[in-house]
Image (spheres, rainbow, N blue to C red):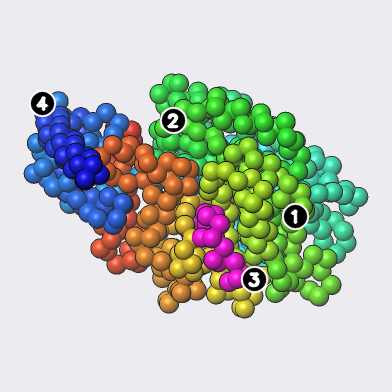
């Protein structure tokens, strides 16, 4: 009898609270109201018409008539004119400082031929006669015979100054003879570590450097000043705002880089929420991990900045045969010295690093592209969970470009997040990649659909600047279509791995927030959530999927304020 009485009292109290809340919402005056739209809430694929914002939080979501009651004399009212509104994009794996710095360098993204690349490089060199180094990124392996560039191309357009150009994925570099000379790289130079100085048959460096061998040249390139970095980040934030990106998860970084975001925040210039992952590896000591653990508390500026994660590189990339595979690469000769790629960290040392970081409560990002690296990462997380029983840490595997079908179900069982970049599966960039993987492994390449069906939590990002575009719209287009923007191949590249637009949008919004333990404050449009919203030129849920790439962001609301608006408003 007492139980029934207490349940009755609790029910009456709950109804009283809800009634009070409803009256408060109804009489509350909003600072910003968005009317006459099609609002995808993101929570359960439901739609509304309007949103009311008070301060930096969403006050209410619903029909126009309901939200209009919150308009007062000082309320800013924006008519969406039927446009789609959705939670702001959350780029869950990005190298934001590197991408921002690259905005003032040679951009080779989108070049269809070597001749077009050389034209851009030459034009940049002429336009910047005082630049000590010519730097840039974005070249694709598939554009070069054999999959790698050579210094002779660059020497033809720039001989008097050193040139350093990163591949679009950041895992290889293309340099000219002047750069090799200044770095003292010749036939006798040896690189001990994870990577390679690519050589021709005569043993001469070709101008291509893989993985860690890039450091031989990088270390002599003048480094940008702190002011250079801050200026670059300001430009990067403007670009992000124009694309509807309101949160980023920096997938590698340092305490110094984190302090740049602190400075921008102090100056009220930070227009994206930042989650920082510190880079760790073989040289990382327990003292380093403890120092990072202390920084987690110092850098906690919720909901703007947090630093609860670490990032480990376990392998390389498919195109340069540095990703670790279970079986040999399909396009390597029988006598190749590393026919299955190689792990960047020996398995036992990697597991020890994972266990130590997990014990300290860090969330771990592991870069694992090859199917063997993915398996090693899952196994290491499994061992860590059994060794360190504590709260769920939502460890992540980054990229997962290939996976054994046997490992698909392990993500859900272990609670490991599948963090992936649709942009890397753009069919225009996968020729060299597909030859290396071979026909038998192709069905489980960039296996988004298979992972979802196996119960995995899928999280999307750009990996900018290790990508052909930072724009989430391009990622959505590829995730849904598996085709280029001109429609190739007609039936899609591995079409069975396509996913629905709703799943792709969730991976860029709600599950991306879940990936940084922030699903309680962002990633959906609902009362009490942070007011981060993107408005689009087209309704992504209603248009022909092949028109997704034509969509643009026309307005971005961040922290309750309009930070970007195009000429259509």
**Is 331 displayed left or right of 425 in the figure?**
right
SS label for mark 3 = helix
Say if 382 sits above or below 527 in the image: below
- Is residue 563 among the parts visible in the rendering? no
Disc 2 marks which residue? 302
Q: Earlier in the sequence, mark 3 or mark 2?
A: 2
Q: Residue at x 50, y 25 (%)?
A: 262
x, y percentage for residue 311? 62, 44
Question: Badges 3 and 4: C-beta atoms under 8 Å apart?
Answer: no
Measure the C-alpha gap from mark 1 to mark 3.
22 Å
Question: Badges 3 and 2: C-beta atoms under 8 Å apart?
Answer: no
- Is residue 73 among the parts visible in the rendering? yes
Say if 376 sits above or below 355 in the image: below
Measure the C-alpha gap from mark 4 to mark 1.
64 Å
Q: Characterize the local packing of mark 1: few (<14), some (14-19) or many (20 or more) Cα atoms within 10 angstroms.
A: some
Question: Badges 4 and 1: C-beta atoms under 8 Å apart?
Answer: no
Disc 4 marks which residue? 73
């Amino acid at each position: 009898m007492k139980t029934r009485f207490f349940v009755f009292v609790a029910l009456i109290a709950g109804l009283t609270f809800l009634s009070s809340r409803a009256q408060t919402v109804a009489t509350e005056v909003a600072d910003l109201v968005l009317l006459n739209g099609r609002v995808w809430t993101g929570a359960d694929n439901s739609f509304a018409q309007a949103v009311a914002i008070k301060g930096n939080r969403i006050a209410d979501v619903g029909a126009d008539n309901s939200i209009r009651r919150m308009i007062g004399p000082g309320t800013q009212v924006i008519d969406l004119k039927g446009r789609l509104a959705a939670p702001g994009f959350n780029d869950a794996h990005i190298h934001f400082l590197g991408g921002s710095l690259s905005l003032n360098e040679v951009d080779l993204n989108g070049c269809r031929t070597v001749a077009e690349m050389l034209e851009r490089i030459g034009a940049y060199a002429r336009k910047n006669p005082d630049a000590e180094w010519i730097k840039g990124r974005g070249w694709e392996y598939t554009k070069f015979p054999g999959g790698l560039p050579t210094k002779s191309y660059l020497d033809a357009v720039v001989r008097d100054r050193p040139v350093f150009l990163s591949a679009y994925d950041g895992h290889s570099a293309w340099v000219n003879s002047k750069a090799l000379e200044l770095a003292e790289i010749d036939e006798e130079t040896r690189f001990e570590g994870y990577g390679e100085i690519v050589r021709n048959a005569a043993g001469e460096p070709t101008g291509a450097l893989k993985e860690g061998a890039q450091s031989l040249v990088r270390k002599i390139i003048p480094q940008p000043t702190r002011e250079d970095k801050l200026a670059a980040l300001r430009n990067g934030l403007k670009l992000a705002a124009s694309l509807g990106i309101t949160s980023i998860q920096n997938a590698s970084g340092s305490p110094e880089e984190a302090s740049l975001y602190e400075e921008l925040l102090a100056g009220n210039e930070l227009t994206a929420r930042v989650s920082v992952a510190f880079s760790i590896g073989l040289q990382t000591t327990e003292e380093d991990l403890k120092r990072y653990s202390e920084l987690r508390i110092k850098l906690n500026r919720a909901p703007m900045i947090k630093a609860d994660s670490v990032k480990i590189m376990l392998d390389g990339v498919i195109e340069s045969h540095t990703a670790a595979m279970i079986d040999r690469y399909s396009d390597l000769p029988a006598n190749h010295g590393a026919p299955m790629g190689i792990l960047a960290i020996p398995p036992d040392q990697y597991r020890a690093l994972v266990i130590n970081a997990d014990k300290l409560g860090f969330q771990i990002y592991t870069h694992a592209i090859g199917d063997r690296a993915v398996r090693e990462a899952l196994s290491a997380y499994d061992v860590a969970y059994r060794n360190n029983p504590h709260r769920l840490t939502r460890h992540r595997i980054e990229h997962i470009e290939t996976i054994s079908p046997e490992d698909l179900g392990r993500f859900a069982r272990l609670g490991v997040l599948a963090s992936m970049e649709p942009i890397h599966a753009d069919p225009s960039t996968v020729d060299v990649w597909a030859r290396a993987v071979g026909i038998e492994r192709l069905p489980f390449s960039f296996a988004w659909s298979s992972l979802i069906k196996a119960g995995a939590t899928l999280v999307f990002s750009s990996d900018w600047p290790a990508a052909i575009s930072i724009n989430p719209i391009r990622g959505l287009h590829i995730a849904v279509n598996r085709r280029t923007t001109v429609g190739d191949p007609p039936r899609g590249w591995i079409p069975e791995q396509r996913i629905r637009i709703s799943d792709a949008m969730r991976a860029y919004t709600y599950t991306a927030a879940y990936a940084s333990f922030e699903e309680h404050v962002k990633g959906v449009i609902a009362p009490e959530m942070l007011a981060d919203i993107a408005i689009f030129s087209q309704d992504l849920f209603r248009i022909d999927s092949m028109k997704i790439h034509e969509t643009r962001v026309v307005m971005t609301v961040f922290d309750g304020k309009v930070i970007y608006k195009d000429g259509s408003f």
